[in-house]
Amino acid sequence: MKRIFTALLLFSAAAVHAQQTSTLTVEKIMRDQKWIGVAPTNYRWADDSKTLYFDWNPQQKAKEQLFRVQAGKNKPELSPDSTTEKAIGPVYTFNQNGSLGVAEQDGDIYLLQVKTKKQSRLTNTMDRESNPGFLINGAIYFLKGGNFFSLDPNTQTLTQLTNFVPGNKPAGNKAVPSPQESWLKNQQLQIFDVLKENTSTAGRRPSRATNKQALKPIYLENKGITGLTLSPDGRFVTYQLVTLAKGNTNTIIPNFVTKSGYTEDINGRTKVGEIPSSYEFFIYDKQRDSAYQVAVSNIQGIKDLPDYLKDYPKQLEERKKKNEDRKVRFTPVIWNSNASAAVLTAKALDNKDLWILKLDPAKGSFSVVDRQRDEAWIAGPGISSYIANIDFIDQNKIYYQSEASGYSHLYVADVNTGSKKQLTSGKWELQTLNLSKDKKTFYFTGNMEHPGITHFYSLPVTGGKPTQITSMKGGNQITMSPDEKWIAINYSYMDKPWELYIQPNKAGAKAIQITESRSEEFKSYAWRKPDLVAFKNRHGDDVYARIYPAKNGGQNSPAVVFVHGAGYLQNVHYWWSQYSREYMFHNLLADNGYTVIDIDYTGSAGYGRNHRTGIYRHMGGKDLTDQVDGVKLLVDKYGVDPKRVGIYGGSYGGFITLMGLFNEPDVFKSGAGLRSVTDWAHYNQGYTANILNEPFNDEIAYQRSSPINFAAGLKGNLLMCHGMVDVNVHFQDIVRLSQKLIELGKDNWELAVYPVEDHGFTTPSSWTDEYKRIFKLFETTLKEK
């Protein structure tokens, strides 16, 4: 009996071992990703902060369903759809004493009586009413049809506040009458006495008396209007007029596989170097019934030229002679609650400056509160694009983020005195930032513990040491309840996709897991936790990497370098990778004897300003040599054969793959470039002009950054894969490079095209075909004897 029991134990252990070591294949990995399990998404709290709603699909049905869970509980349940909308409610803006709230829902305005929780509908129209708020006098304001209106909640009187009119001002009747017209007019006056007097009112009925005050029309001409804001006292309306650029050419993308059977054209984007739109900032003073433009000429540094022009002496001299104000774009104005101060940001269209400006609306002038200058380009967490994270703490102080220290941190400035104070510091980034409702506490996420770990923190508005609230090592994404007492945590780890946890919003509290989404099939494989390491690149900078050591690897084993896309993105971290398919593929490669390295190369997110801008004017410079230095690490510490190294990646990763094969052919024996940028002069304006300026202004940067210029260096084996309806990196890119390789007489490359795919593939069969080709490339080129 004892022998039988022992045998059963051995059989059971073998079965468990077999279950935990299921074999990975490309076909399995690249199926519809529901096979992994569908993680919860779209977290939103009910108004009462007692219930959290989220979308989830634990049974892998055709679509997600709505679930809910009570704060402090751990059992989610399906939510009756009929109760959800009412429970969640719209997002309200409250008056100064907090007794009333106003919100937009489905294009109408709703009023909330806070004490009684009674909600009433204020508008019910076919037009959309939006952007509601309260004036100091208690009136409700909102936008409708491009104009501001106010509504007295007591009398229900609706008043139009602005009169913006599209088109040009009507021309007066200044046409010179013909001789015949003049003769007839004179004859009428000679014959009829009634026309000789009061000709201006002849034949008209007396008008009725009216109390209606005519609103001065403000004609927009051929310009668009954006950024409309109304001061809390109702006096000033601020806005931005946009003159759209003319003369730009959009690219055309042919779509070959269509329902009609005909080739259909997709109207795509322009290329970098497009003619920019122009922006003008205006104020309408209702008290003076006057609209006027605010000039930018007094903004500090408005005429400063970028340093790169030193490489182009003639262009520099011409720009100096012109002595022009640089063009800027504005954000909407932010007012304090009593209308005594207003701020906004302006960003130079050459991407070198971001100003926080104080607005004097009565005088129509700007003064500088803070200037952020970067000879590369202004960006970073809380600073990116044209919307900066900025708001009032009280009537005089604002908070904002800046990379002045080299990392994105929190600052407070007094808009009256100009004094500034930095509240957070260190070699880490503030990645999200919010102010509590009582304006006493900042809440933020940051990678203070480690570049690849995010936690949630609180900090008094007066400063001090941040208090860490979350405790789970990995990625913590926070959705706070309206009463700020609970946090929903979207949490994941290297080998575990995202799941929902709920925790009281205080340090030391325990996070309770709410969902378990992983499928049994996914859990049957022992997914790796890659080594997360740091190494010094040739420039002395710290570079972080994930390494997947080869299973049963030894000396002279092959290796693969994976290059993440987007450039400014972080993929070396302790949470679940957004490159989930690639993560699984790297496990497959490691099972088959490859050591895989995934590097957050220069230009990646999460490491501060110098790392972010280290590719300025030379993409394929430090970001490429980081890959080469990573290979050296593999050779020195992981036993990799330096003659058997491959490289692959998509988008920016495809670009680096091409640069690696063309410029480092002795390091990379083979590579797969997916949806690759081959010539930056053919990419878009918003991304490329930040890093390389414009082709006609900075030809040097484009010459040394575009793979097509170095294609002659190809020695190894190159696989290129591209979707034919890619509206991001156009199929034209890869066609142009293919023609160049043909003209160069290269025969060690191939191109796989995907007729129905955009930049991000959506069809499992396309993913499968692509990665089978990549795997075959490495198997046939890196394992050959």
Image (tube, helix red, strand yellow):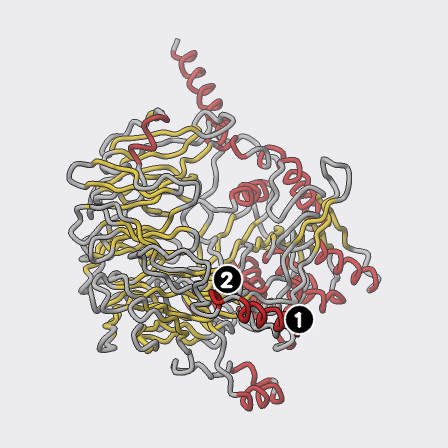
Residue in front for this viewpoint, 478 or 429 = 478
Q: Quadrant of residue 370?
A: bottom left
Q: Secondary structure at mark 2?
A: strand
Cα separation between marks 2 and 1: 44 Å
Report if residue 487 is visible in the image.
Answer: yes
Q: Are marks 2 and 1 in contact (CB under 8 Å)?
A: no
Q: Residue at x 23, y 53 (%)?
A: 436
* Label 2 Cα neighbours within 10 Å, binned few <14 / some 14-19 / many ≥20: some
> Residue 428: x and y, percent?
35, 63
> Residue 607: x and y, percent?
42, 63
Q: As displayed, is residue 172 above or below residue 778?
A: below
According to the picture, the residue beneath numbered tag 2 turns out to be 224
In this view, the mark in front (2 or 1): 1
Q: As displayed, is residue 711 above or below residue 732?
A: below
Residue in front for this viewpoint, 748 or 683 = 683
Residue in front for this viewpoint, 169 or 94 = 169
Q: Amino acid at mark 1?
A: Gln
Q: Residue at x 32, y 50 (%)?
A: 132
Q: Residue at x 53, y 60 (%)?
A: 567
Q: Amino acid at mark 2?
A: Gly
According to the picture, the residue beneath numbered tag 1 turns out to be 180
> Residue 329: x and y, percent?
46, 69
Question: Which numbered marker is on residue 219?
Answer: none
Q: Earlier in the sequence, mark 2 or mark 1?
A: 1
